[in-house]
Image (tube, rainbow, N blue to C red):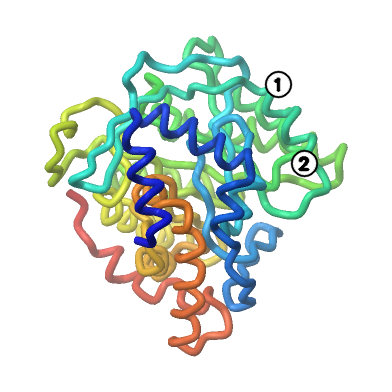
């Protein structure tokens, strides 16, 4: 880890995790972080085109960091090829009681039970409208309010409000911190949800002439039968992509004193599970559906392994908590080095090269 990252980590770890998160957002808003972390040079071998979008490189910031669409462009300035804001709900909500984020430093992991805390659609929409015309891909991750009487209607409203300002829309039905939300992954509920958001997206596209791609974000704790039904619905409804995966409820192999905290686990311990699920989904969905691999990415090597397991793009969040603000640039440069060593003209040529091995991997 470079000295800048070690210093930043020491300073931020002096605060509780939620305060540290707010300080990092403030640093990005000020422009100081980007000045200290120069963007890596553009390498055409890292360019990825999926769902009608052109990504300069395959590395993105996952949802959960920039919850209120405050710093998507500052994140792009760190070297990310795209950023994803949210999760955004129609009404503002405070989320679950504090403390609700726990660093598992011995495991390079985090457990959170945030509960979709965010400022709601209206404030985020104003920020995203202000960046219309700027370069760079910013997706919008949408969810449902905890107290909603009709959660599917919340997703429809999210599509209607953000379709015109989002590079893509991520339908998040996989957070473990909103009771009952993961039930939307069941076959009948998912069919209704996808039909609704597709209808809303197509209605908005008729106004703008530019349909926003839809990506479905799923959990890593699904059975083989559940993966089957999700894949069948995605293929039947022609959803553009799937994000694999959200946080896990598994606690296998953890050493930290915080291992028993409730919430979703992210970071290094999630890597193997999420990558195995990613490969299983690639096999089920075939070569043409876009897949974004998330979970345990903290280096060029782990990012590359996601691609080898079937991902077109990868995302991180927890990795940057431990790796610091220069991590995105280091990963992008490392991916370029791998492409150079492998002698490929595009990083996508390496996709699926470890698919069979990861598909066969056991999930604890």
Whether residue 68 can be seen here: yes
User: Which quarter of the figure is the N terminus placed in?
Assistant: bottom left
Residue, x 41% and y 51% (percent of image)?
324
Residue 44 found in image quarter: bottom right
Q: In this picture, is 199 found above or below 342? A: above
Q: Position of residue 202 (x, y in %)?
A: 76, 39
Q: Which residue is under mark 2?
A: 131
Residue at the bottom extreme of this rendering: 343
Position of 143 with respect to 207 (left or right) is: left
Position of 141 with respect to 199 (left or right) is: left
Residue, x 53% and y 12% (percent of image)?
148
Q: Position of residue 209 (x, y in %)?
A: 86, 46
Q: In this picture, is 344 found above or below 314? A: below
Name the front one of labels 2 and 1: 2
Q: Which mark is residue 318?
A: none
Q: Which mark is residue 122?
A: 1
Q: In this picture, is 157 found above or below 327? A: above
Q: Earlier in the sequence, mark 2 or mark 1?
A: 1
Q: Position of residue 223 (x, y in %)?
A: 28, 43
Residue, x 56% and y 34% (percent of image)?
26
Say which of 232 and 241 sits in front.
241
Q: Which structural element holds mark 1?
A: helix
Residue, x 44% and y 44% (percent of image)?
230
Residue 109 found in image quarter: top left
Q: Which structural element holds mark 2?
A: loop
How far apart are labels 2 and 1 at the CA level?
A: 15 Å
Q: In this picture, is 278 found above or below 47? A: above
Say which of 271 and 327 sits in front.
327
Q: Position of residue 78 (x, y in %)?
A: 57, 55
């Amino acid at each position: 880890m470079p000295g800048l990252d070690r210093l930043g980590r020491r300073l931020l770890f002096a605060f509780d995790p939620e305060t540290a998160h707010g300080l990092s957002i403030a640093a990005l808003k000020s422009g100081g972080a980007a000045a200290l972390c120069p963007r890596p040079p553009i390498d055409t071998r890292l360019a990825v085109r999926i769902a009608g979008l052109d990504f300069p490189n395959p590395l993105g910031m996952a949802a959960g960091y920039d919850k209120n669409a405050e710093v998507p462009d500052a994140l792009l300035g760190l070297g990310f090829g795209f950023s994803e804001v949210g999760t955004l709900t129609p009404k503002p909500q405070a989320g679950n009681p504090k403390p609700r984020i726990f660093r598992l430093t011995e495991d390079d992991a985090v457990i959170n039970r945030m509960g979709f805390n965010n400022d709601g659609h209206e404030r985020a929409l104003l920020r995203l409208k202000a960046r219309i015309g700027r370069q760079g891909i910013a997706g919008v991750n949408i969810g449902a309010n905890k107290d909603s009487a009709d959660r599917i209607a919340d997703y429809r409203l999210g599509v209607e409000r953000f379709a015109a300002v989002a590079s893509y829309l991520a339908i998040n039905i996989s957070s473990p911190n909103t009771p009952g939300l993961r039930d939307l992954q069941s076959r009948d509920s998912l069919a209704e949800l996808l039909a609704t958001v597709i209808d809303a997206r197509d209605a908005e596209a008729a106004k703008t002439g530019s349909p926003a791609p839809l990506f479905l974000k799923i959990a890593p704790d699904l059975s083989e039968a559940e993966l089957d039904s999700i894949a069948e619905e995605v293929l039947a409804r022609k959803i553009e992509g799937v994000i694999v995966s959200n946080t896990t409820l598994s606690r296998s192999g953890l050493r930290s004193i915080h291992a028993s905290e409730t919430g979703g686990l992210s970071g290094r311990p999630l890597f193997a599970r999420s990558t195995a699920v990613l490969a299983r989904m690639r096999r089920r969905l075939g070569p043409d559906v876009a897949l974004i691999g998330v979970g345990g990415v903290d280096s060029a090597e782990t990012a590359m392994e996601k691609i080898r397991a079937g991902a077109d793009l990868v995302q991180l969040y927890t990795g940057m908590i431990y790796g610091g603000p220069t991590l995105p640039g280091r990963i992008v440069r490392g991916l370029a080095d791998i492409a150079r060593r492998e002698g490929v003209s595009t990083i996508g040529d390496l996709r699926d090269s470890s698919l069979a091995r990861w598909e066969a991997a056991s999930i604890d």
